[in-house]
Image (spheres, rainbow, N blue to C red):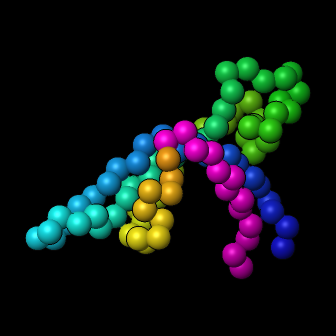
Amino acid sequence: MPVMMRAKFQVGFVQEHFNGPNKSKSCETLNMHAVAASKYPEDGSDEDNTYAKFSPGANMVINTANLALFGKFMVGDRYYLDFTSAT
């Protein structure tokens, strides 16, 4: 099925969580927000704004306990998020 919407998110904050008697890292929380520009063309066409046109706004929090992903997401990194139907 084709992509229904594409958004661009930027990592704003990464929080590390430590647990257990040896205080080993148990989780990372990724705080992300939609990428938006301060000004857009009159027709709303802009690669950072194609999902929202004129009014972008979104926040996302992801908790990951996958050791292979620790340290892979850095503040300022940008990622596409593609929405497709799961049914």
The reply, left or right, for residue 10 in relation to residue 46 is: left
Camera sees residue 19: yes
Quadrant assignment, res 38: top right
Give the quadrant of the C terminus: bottom right
Of 75 and 31, which appears nearest the observer? 75
Q: Position of residue 14 (x, y in %)?
A: 40, 48
Does 80 appear in magenta? yes
Q: Residue furthest right?
A: 43
Q: Position of residue 12 (x, y in %)?
A: 48, 40
Camera sees residue 33: no
Of 29 and 68, which appears nearest the observer? 68
Q: What residue is at 75 percent from the left and 52 percent from the top?
A: 6
Q: What residue is at 62 percent from the left and 45 percent from the top?
A: 78
Q: What residue is at 51 percent from the left and 53 percent from the top?
A: 73
Q: Is residue 39 above or below residue 14?
A: above
Q: Position of residue 82 (x, y in %)?
A: 72, 59
Q: What residue is at 55 percent from the left and 39 percent from the top?
A: 76
Q: Is residue 55 above or below residue 1?
A: above
The magenta segment is 75-87
Quadrant assignment, res 45: top right
Quadrant assignment, res 86: bottom right
Of 52 and 34, which appears nearest the observer? 34
Of 41 and 78, which appears nearest the observer? 78
Give the quadrant of the N terminus: bottom right
Does 52 appear in magenta? no
